[in-house]
Amino acid sequence: MRQNQPKKTVASTIKSVKPLVIATWKTDLAVETAAAYLAKGASALDAVEQGCRIEEANEKGQSVGKGGLPDRDGNVTLDACIMDEKGNYGAVLGVKNIKHVISVARKVMEDTPHVMLVGEGAEQFAVSKGFERENLLTEASKKAWEKWKIKSEYKPIINIENHDTIGMLAVDKDGNISGACTTSGLAYKLAGRVGDSPIIGGGLFVDNEVGGASATGLGEEVLKTVGSFLIVELMRQGKTPQEACEIAIGRIVNKPGKDFKNFQVGYIAVNKQGETGAYSIHQWFSYNLFKNGENKNIQSNYFNKA
């Protein structure tokens, strides 16, 4: 055997894969948009940004962008992050009055020395970059908030708490992987609450040599196990995306004293070979997958079959 041969990376030992997009929940148009960008030769980074912008502009989806359900004080605050194939990352947390926070997160990543901006500072930065302020609280979300105030019960509802939070992963024609995640967070949360969606390793993680993962559901539980980072590291160790998602859910449900029956967490993942996986605690978590020219909504397998 010859000595001093350069070590092969994971990326250098795999065959090229066709472009694909995977995203949490039933996000047909967002995934279709991202796939259309890939078909034109765009990067995975451009694809996930443009795909997520579709949900941010969808006022009927009350957990992303404009029309998102507010905190208990009636303020819509948005969180988002984005991560490219080079390991660069940008995020904004608790942003008011700016609809396309996924694009603001990309600006943080590309135009500042920072990876995270919060609250008023993030809003001011967005305005300085040409984003326009607008009222994010629609009449429908305002009415829902006013109805909630009558009892003010503060508890997540399985498959509703973050139903339209979108986490998206894409593989482009060059085999590069990028990811994005955007949300208005848990409905009627305490002012200032931030979940997993904009946190690197929680709601999203990408390693271009291995793969990427994203999460949805009750963010506090994802953060406690750094779920997306865990999935990517498991894939690095040789697990398939499906196996990695199942192990990550196991890390949550097998904690001593954990009453997982009262909340939902779901994961999606893709590896460098273009294999995908998804798994959740409870039934009815779904994801959209664009692969080989088809955009399908698929019901995830799940842990709690009792």
Image (tube, rainbow, N blue to C red):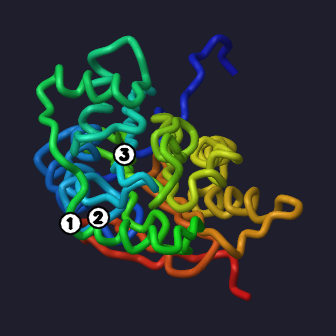
Q: Residue at x 52, y 68 (%)?
A: 152
Q: Is residue 98 left or right of residue 190?
A: left
Quarter of the rendering occupied by the C terminus: bottom right
Q: CA distance from mark 1 to mark 3?
A: 16 Å
Is 28 above or below relative to 5? below
Residue 2 placed where, x, y %? 66, 16
Q: Is residue 201 left or right of residue 34?
A: right
Residue identifier under label 2 = 142
Q: Residue at x 23, y 40 (%)?
A: 98
- Disc 2 versus disc 3: nearer the observer: 2
Q: Residue at x 56, y 74 (%)?
A: 158
Q: Is residue 210 left or right of residue 168?
A: right
Identify residue type, mark 1.
Glu
Residue 270 placed where, x, y %? 47, 53
Identify residue type, mark 3.
Thr
Q: CA distance from mark 2 to mark 3?
A: 14 Å
Between 177 and 55, the residue placed more toward the observer is: 55
Other residues around mark 1 within 10 Å, as few (<14) / some (14–19) / many (≥20): few
Q: Earlier in the sequence, mark 1 or mark 3?
A: 3
Is 63 above or below relative to 40? below
Q: CA distance from mark 1 to mark 2?
A: 5 Å
Q: Residue at x 60, y 16 (%)?
A: 5
Name the disc covering residue 139, or none.
1
Residue identifier under label 3 = 77
Quadrant position of residue 125: top left
